[in-house]
Structures are given as structure tokens and as C-alpha cells.
Amino acid sequence: MFLGAGQPVLAAQIIASNTSISSDVGGVTLTLGLSDSTPFSVYTLDNPRRLLIDMGDTELENLPAGLGSEIPEVAALRHGLFQLGEARIVLDLSVPMVVHSAHSTRTPSGSEQIAIRLARASAAKFAANSANPDGNVWHRNQVEVEIEGQDGLPIIAIDAGHGGVDLGAQKDDVHEKTITLQFAEILRNTLLEDGRFRVVMTRTTDVFIPLGERVEIARRAGADAFISLHADVVTLGRARGTTVFSLSETSEDQEAITIATLENRADLVAGISAEGEDDQITQVLLQMAHRETDALSNRFADVLAESLWFQNDLEIKSRRMSAGFRVLRAPEIPSVLVELGFMSDASDLKKLQDPEWQLGMSEALRSALVTWLEVEAEMRGLLRN
């Protein structure tokens, strides 16, 4: 791992004209032009192979479009806000390469330039040289939980999927992370205006939040329900309309498994390792804790799917499915994942960006929450009797 020093007063800006990437026989050179110095960390991670560049307060919007697209060693490049005050650039690598050098220099014009040299290496050497950065350098602080609404009301956790460096699904220049945040804000306002709910948001800005931290935000808030919002794409066949998911670790539906697999990659996309999260003892404990919550989640998902039935075209109805989404694994909180629509379908994509449709969908979800809470209160009364 290589660390640069120097604390900027203001956010550094990418200078596009001083930013480039090139390939030669020995490896790849990436040069980043910056308006000011910023601390940075460069390292690689395996499975999948990728290079991560963590930077201090830096705005990356000026990165040249298509940077690295003509370099065969680079499969993809993405960037974004990793957390407040930290930016991240991720290069997916087609071949194993290790960090040979990384340093910053001041240019004659007073700007800063970070030069990173990657050298070709064997798969074994790449694996041996790939590791997470020191925790005390890039330690993630817990997201502060902010609960809105009147005390004593049911708390609904709204999770806008993806964010920051994790763009989510993409269709042309539209990103899933943008759609989910827009809708999450509308749903929050709808619930608060109703006056029967309190709300906690897992994110309110374009920032990356790990899957596990999203669940922990809901738990620290004492949420009564957790709704994760998404908008996917399909590459084979055609899919339209909304889909409501509950948790199932044994789903046999291939489409549900495919969608869950894509959503569960969010941490890997942002450069976070999920190793060790699914050890055998943890799984046994979670299964025990989930028995009662699973029943609540299933009823929750059933009510939501029925409420969203008329939000789609007449020939396309809301679907009800289950799969192993990591973000639904809070053992004590009824949790659902709502695919608002499919960005790969032109009709759905138009709706997903339509404020009127978004408002109608948020009102349908509010009605479903009211119904579900009434059903659960009635069932608790029957159990007591």
C-alpha cells in the first residue's frame, strides 16, 4: 500500500487535461491531475482482481469520459464518493498487475499530479500482494442515525440502493443509484406527511454505504420495517413491472437468484471484501433468529406486492419472489427489497424517472405499510387472546 501526505483545505478537483492512462510492454501507467494535494491510498484486491485508489476530499466529476476504455488490461473503471470526505476510483483488471510505484508531485503551474505504475505479475504474486488498506488510515466511521418524525410512531427504514462509487444498474446515462435516491426521498416525504410514521434513511446523498452497514443503520434506529429500493436491468429476455422480494436462502427461481447475485456484489464493486461474513456459526445463529422474522417479512412482502398491483400496466402485474439478498438479513426486522422496475425496459425506464409515477408508487407503499401494521396488530391481539 502506498500513502501520500498533505491535507487539503478545500476539495481537490480533477484536471482532465492532466489525467491519462497508457499501456506498454511492462504494464500500465495512470496519471491523475489534481488542482490541489490530497492524501491517497493505492492497493489491489483479488477475487475479482481490481485496483483501488482512495483519496481524500476530492471531486471526481471531471475524470475524462471513457478513461481506460482502450486499455486491454483495464476491464472497467468507475468512481464516486466512497463516504463523506473520501473518494474512490476502482479499476477492474483483466490481467494480474501489482503496484510498482505511486507518488505525487507538484507541477510548475502549482497543481498536483499522482502517478501510479502497475507492473505485470503472475496470479500468485498478485494474490500475495493484494490486501485491504490499514484500518487506522481508511477506517469507516459508523453512519450517524437520524430518525425523523414524532416519537412513539413505527420507524420505517428506507434504503436507497447503491450510491457513490457503486453506480448500480446502468441504462445509457441513467444510473440506478440516482433513481433509488430520488424515490427514497419522495417515499420519506410521503410517510412523514402522512403523520403515522417515523423514518430513517440509510443514505441521503450520493455516498457508498456497505450492505452490512445499511442493515446496522436500521437496527441502531430500532426500525419496525426495512425497505430496500432498487431498479434493475436484464440482458436476456424482457422483464417489466415491480417485484417485491423477501429473504430466502434456498430460492430455486433462477431469475430471483440472478437478481440477488447482482445486488449482493455491491460491496465487491466498491472494493470491500465480504470474506468471513457467512461463517457456519453465524449462519446457524441467524437461522434461529430469523424464524419469527421471516414470517413477518413474508406477510410484509405479500401486502406490498398486492398494494403495488395497480401501479403497473394492465398486462404487467407486481410480482412476489424471494432470494438470498444480504441486505435483508437483519434477524429482528421484517425486511423486503422492492425492484421498482427494470431500466432495461423503455416503458419502465420512463416511469422510473417520472415524478408523478414516483409519487403514486410512494403512496401505494404508504398504504401497504398502514395495512401491514394493522394486520400485525390484529394478529398480536389474537395471539394474546
Image (cartoon, grey):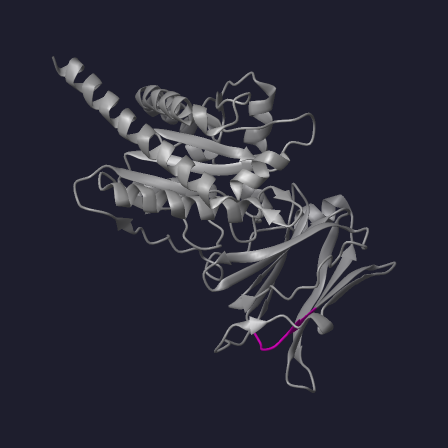
Q: Is residue 168 left or right of residue 159?
A: right
Residue situated in front as seen by the camera: 343 or 269: 343
Classify residue 364 by image quadrant: top left
Please say whether residue 302 is visible from this viewpoint: yes
The percent coordinates of residue 194 (x first, y second) are: 26, 41
Residue at the farthest left position:
385
Specify the quadrant that holds the C terminus: top left
Count of number-bearing discs:
0
Residue situated in front as seen by the camera: 266 or 301: 301
Q: Is residue 114 left or right of residue 154?
A: right
Which residue is located at x 20 percent, y 39 percent? 153
Which residue is located at x 34 percent, y 29 percent? 331
* 34 in the magenta segment: yes
Q: Is residue 314 above or below residue 50?
A: above
Please say whether residue 274 is visible from this viewpoint: no
The percent coordinates of residue 181 (x first, y second) are: 46, 48
Residue at the farthest right position:
25
Residue situated in front as seen by the camera: 316 or 192: 316
Which residue is located at x 49 percent, y 54 percent? 206
The percent coordinates of residue 179 (x first, y second) are: 51, 45
Specify the quadrant that holds the N terminus: bottom right
Q: Is residue 60 left or right of residue 376?
A: right
* 251 in the magenta segment: no
Residue at the farthest bottom position:
108
Which residue is located at x 15 percent, y 18 percent? 381
The percent coordinates of residue 49 (x first, y second) are: 68, 46
Residue situated in front as seen by the camera: 177 or 139: 177
- The region drawn magenta spans 32-37
Q: Is residue 152 above or below residue 261?
A: below
